[in-house]
Amino acid sequence: MKYKIVCDVHTHTLASGHAYGTIREMAEAAAEKGIELLGISEHGPGIEGTCSPVYFWGLTKTVPRILNGVEMFHGCELNVLNNGTISLPDKYVYFLDYGIVGIHLMCYEDVGAEKNTDNLIECMKHPKVNFISHPDSDDSPVNYERLVKAAKKYDVALELNNNSLVEKHRRFNCYENYRTMLKLCMEHRTNIIVSSDAHDPSQVGKFDLAIELLEEIDFDEELIVNTSKEKFKEFIARKNRVIEKK
Ligand SMILES: [Zn+2]
Ligand SMILES: [Zn+2]
């Protein structure tokens, strides 16, 4: 297989309120699937039933960094709000290894492609935001040209989300939207990340549909940040160094 993805950093556990495994069950599944680095990214405030902000405070200090031989990272799938800010206060965000930001209509009102894009770009400027999750649905459209260019500028990787492509809960027009996004990423040399968005241990490391799509458009492997642990960690560290300089 041309594309080998060894880090899965967009996953959810019981703490997200609508996912069904524990951190340890997710790590076990990751080990079985050959995932070398597992990132847990519970939903941030705004999603019904998710953990409270203080949950994010203890993660990196408390959970062992290696479980079942898998390196563990901790992030959050933050919500973009309609004023272009993220839904978790900075005092918690800075305890995390990385941040993902995504549009979730449970706590965000679609305001059309241009304004949605503006709001996501505002979040990209945050030093702890490394990824944009599932920018793929016509329910919350974006301007791909602007999104891809801004992601390059602010050192953010755009996600190709395997879960969005699964037929039983496929996101609206996501195949076409991903084709557009991925072609622009190659044109502008913008990084992407491939994620399972697992909500159950059985989904950890599941990238089959995403990889099919990458093969279809012969996507440039160099632009995928999670094909090795080193590459992923260097990608995160690059933006973190900006914080340390402040
Ligand atoms: Zn999401
Ligand atoms: Zn998610």
Image (tube, grey):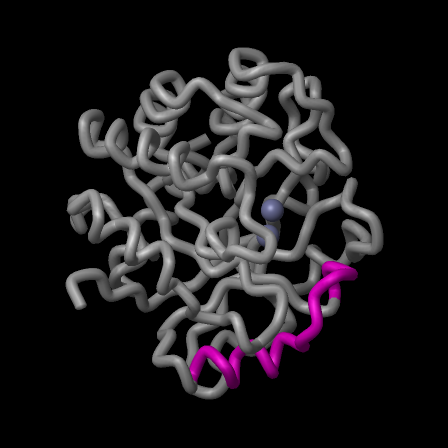
In the displayed structure image, the side of residue 107 where residue 245 appears, left or right:
left
* Residue at the outermost top position: 114
Question: Is residue 22 one of those drawn in magenta?
Answer: yes
Task: Pick the quarter of the image with the N terminus.
Answer: bottom left
Q: Quadrant of residue 120?
A: top right
Q: Which residues are magenta?
A: 15-31
Residue 144 horizontal/vertical position (percent): 39, 23
Q: Quadrant of residue 201?
A: bottom right
* Residue for point 52% across, 55% down: 167
In the displayed structure image, the side of residue 200 where residue 164 appears, left or right:
left
Residue 204 horizontal/vertical position (percent): 49, 71
* Residue for point 44% across, 18% down: 143
Q: Is residue 127 above or below residue 76?
A: above
* Residue at the outermost front position: 167
**Residue 68 in view:** yes
Q: Is residue 195 above or below residue 240?
A: below
In the displayed structure image, the side of residue 96 where residue 176 appears, left or right:
left
Question: Is residue 4 one of those drawn in magenta?
Answer: no
* Residue for point 37% across, 37% down: 178
Residue 36 horizontal/vertical position (percent): 36, 74
Q: Is residue 36 above or below residue 172?
A: below
In the displayed structure image, the side of residue 80 where residue 159 appears, left or right:
left
Helix, strand or loop: magenta stretch: helix
In depth, the one of 28 and 92 nearer the eye is 28
Residue 135 horizontal/vertical position (percent): 49, 35
* Residue for point 78% across, 40% down: 46
**Residue 237 in view:** no
